[in-house]
Image (spheres, helix red, strand yellow):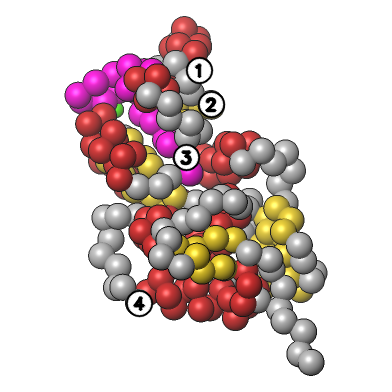
Amino acid sequence: MHVLLVEDDALIASGIVAGLNAMSLTVTHVADARSAEASLRMGHFDVLILDLGLPDEDGIRLLQRLRQQGMELPVLILTARDAVTDRVTGLQAGGDDYLLKPFDLRELAARLHTLVRRAAGRSVNIVEHGPLRFDPGTCQAWLDSEPVHLPRRELALLQVLLNNPTRVLSSDNLKDALYGFSEDVESNALNVHIHHLRRKLGNSIIETVRGLGYRLGPAGREVES
Ligand code: CA
């Protein structure tokens, strides 16, 4: 899951980035409204975390504008404002959920998973894809009921594919989801993760769409004949 975090408080932001990274989420952090809009134009994200008190613009106004422009990304609002009117305004402006500061990072992660799941049209926690089962809450995957160990990058790769089951994702989309675009990525790194995921979940799990990118395919190891 690739999270865009818009938060101007450096201390809070670094805590969120470290905490979500530890739970296998990829986070791109920006500190103002202008950078948030630029990032949304550049990359693929699954969810937006939005602080309301930003240095260059009120978060509510930013959110209203993004929704008017047709942005459909789920948005979790972070606010220190404990007034009911602020929360109502945030939800009316197009927020999907909100958390009051200070909050528990595990609760933040759980809410992000719920928002992304809802946006993908799934109502149950476990994602089923043929013989593959995946629990985004615990980041555990099973193939034919056997647990499969997936390190952080492979988990992120599997999540972005499962969250976009019909979409062709470019290499850049996948790299954004795995690393965020602040990180320098070796060109071969993505291929290595794709190779590992195919080895563990079956060659067809990631289909190559020539010239365009990759798409989720059927899971399951080939039967040896
Ligand atoms: Ca702030």
Q: Residue at x 50, y 51 (%)?
A: 1
Instruction: Report if the CB atoms under discs 1 and 2 are less than 8 Å apart.
Output: yes
The residue sitting at the front extreme is: 211
Residue 147 appears left or right of 73: right
Q: Quadrant of residue 32?
A: top left
Question: Label 2 amino acid?
Answer: Asp
Residue at the limit of the structure toward the left, as seen here: 56
Mark 1 is surrounded, within 10 Å at the Cα level, by few (under 14), some (14 to 19) or many (20 or more) other residues, namely: some
Earlier residue among tags 1 and 2 = 1
Name the amino acid type tagged 4. Asn
Which label is found at residue 47? 3
- Can you give x and y, in whole percent of width and height, for residue 163 in the image? 58, 50
Q: Residue furthest bottom?
A: 225
Q: Are marks 1 and 4 in contact (CB under 8 Å)?
A: no
Q: CA distance from mark 1 to mark 2?
A: 6 Å
- Indicate which disc residue 91 carries: 1
Q: Secondary structure at mark 3?
A: strand
Q: Which residue is found at the position 28% from the left and 33% from the top?
A: 37
Residue on which the image places disc 4? 188
Residue 144 spot, x, y in % from top left: 79, 71
